[in-house]
Image (tube, rainbow, N blue to C red):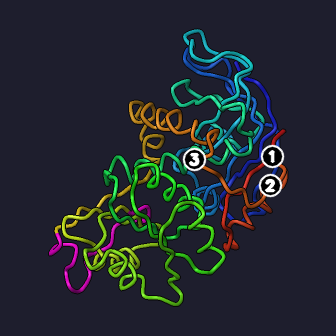
């Protein structure tokens, strides 16, 4: 059985102008543990523009609906769902890699184990930009690097969406945080989120600055969100037995073999892997991360900086702004 909904779709890879609104089918009822969510907002992520330009990972029966992050209201539940009820406000990260529709749509079918309730104090727009970056930062810093209180942590690209979340996650763990930025305004932003030191990579050598910040001891943890060249340079700023986590792919060692000589542990984090490979237990784990952290939005311990809001029908404009760069926050599609 299927239902109809309006969605922004793509039928082939290309630029932002390939996105267009049309009616698509959504399968409901779904599995016994599925929940039907009427979406109110969808969060944009850089992965969305990647899939739009390069093509989805999974084949779809119809046009591809992008979008991983969503927030809305439960409209119906499967026969085995007991933890959620019609009317609940929920957010999640699911879809957007091809296959079942993503969140650029009016409706989403989501397994109950990937849902988190949204506290009453938190808006749909805020909740919609939260799950993917929360999962990414938690996997990188807590599950992989094991960040502990008092450790020196460097976050590359601290003013970006993932960088902002990573600073706040590291702060929750009691770490000392430095972040690389490209302007004074972004330096002020990362400090407001909990960074002790902001390093302008346009004017300062971030390796020298990080080593001086740690009184010559080197970093315990570094998060790379800039690319292999920056990651390889970071090796020289690390303490022996440190952890480097990358979201961008692993480079070779630097010319001085710092990764080898300092006995560094290198971690890759690609949080879409469980969806791509259908790893249910990891999807359950990721849903648990969102449920664990969403309360920090209500308490103010985690804040989400929304840079722009577009109606769903203007998703192409939203992609254009994201690809233009220079933002210090997240973009939201309003579906209400």
Q: Circle 3 sits in a helix, a strand or a loop, which is it?
A: loop
> Residue reaching furthest bottom?
203
Which of the marked residues, 1 or 2, is nearer the chain's N terminus?
2
Nearer the observer: mark 3 or 2; the answer is: 3
Q: Residue drawn 72% across and 62% down? A: 319
Q: Residue drawn 57% across and 16% down? A: 83
Q: Residues within 10 Å of mark 2 (few under 14, many from 20)?
A: some
Q: Are marks 1 and 2 in contact (CB under 8 Å)?
A: yes
Q: Residue drawn 40% across and 49% down? A: 173
Return the x and y of residue 302 as percentages of the image width and height: 58, 48
Confirm whether the magenta stretch covers residue 65: no
Give the magenta range. 246-262
Circle 1 sits on which residue? 334
Circle 2 sits on which residue? 309
Rounded to the nearest angstrom, the CA distance separating label 1 from label 2 is: 7 Å
Q: Are marks 1 and 3 in contact (CB under 8 Å)?
A: no
Front position in the image: 16 or 236: 236
Q: Circle 2 sits in a helix, a strand or a loop, which is it?
A: strand
Q: Circle 1 sits in a helix, a strand or a loop, which is it?
A: strand
Circle 3 sits on which residue? 301
Confirm whether the magenta stretch covers residue 261: yes
Q: Residues within 10 Å of mark 1 (few under 14, many from 20)?
A: many
């Amino acid at each position: 059985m299927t239902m109809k909904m309006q969605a922004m779709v793509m039928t082939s890879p290309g630029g932002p102008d390939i996105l267009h609104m049309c009616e698509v089918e959504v399968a409901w009822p779904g599995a016994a543990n599925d929940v039907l969510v009427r979406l109110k907002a969808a969060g944009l992520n850089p992965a969305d523009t990647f899939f739009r330009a390069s093509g989805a990972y999974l084949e779809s029966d119809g046009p591809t609906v992008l979008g991983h992050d969503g927030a809305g209201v439960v409209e119906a539940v499967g026969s085995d769902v007991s933890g959620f009820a019609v009317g609940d406000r929920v957010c999640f990260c699911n879809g957007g890699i091809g296959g079942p529709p993503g969140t650029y749509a009016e409706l989403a079918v989501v397994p109950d184990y990937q849902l988190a309730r949204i506290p009453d104090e938190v808006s749909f727009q805020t909740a919609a930009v939260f799950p993917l970056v929360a999962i990414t930062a938690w996997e990188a810093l807590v599950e992989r690097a094991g960040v502990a209180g008092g450790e020196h942590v460097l976050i590359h690209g601290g003013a970006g969406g993932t960088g902002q979340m990573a600073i706040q996650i590291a702060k929750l763990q009691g770490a000392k945080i430095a972040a690389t930025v490209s302007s004074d305004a972004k330096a002020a932003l990362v400090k407001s989120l909990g960074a002790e030191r902001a390093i302008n990579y346009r004017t300062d050598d971030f390796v020298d600055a990080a080593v001086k910040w740690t009184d010559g001891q080197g970093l315990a943890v570094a998060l790379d969100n800039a690319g292999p060249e920056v990651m390889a340079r970071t090796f020289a700023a690390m303490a022996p037995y440190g952890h480097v986590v990358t979201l961008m792919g692993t480079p070779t060692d630097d010319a001085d073999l710092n990764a080898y000589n300092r006995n560094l542990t290198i971690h890759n984090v690609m949080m879409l892997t469980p969806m791509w490979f259908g790893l249910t237990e990891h999807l359950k784990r990721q849903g648990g991360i969102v449920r664990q952290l969403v309360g920090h939005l209500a308490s103010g311990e985690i804040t989400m900086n929304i840079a722009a809001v577009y109606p769903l029908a203007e998703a192409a404009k939203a992609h254009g702004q994201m690809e233009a760069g220079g933002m210090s926050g997240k973009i939201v599609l309003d579906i209400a």
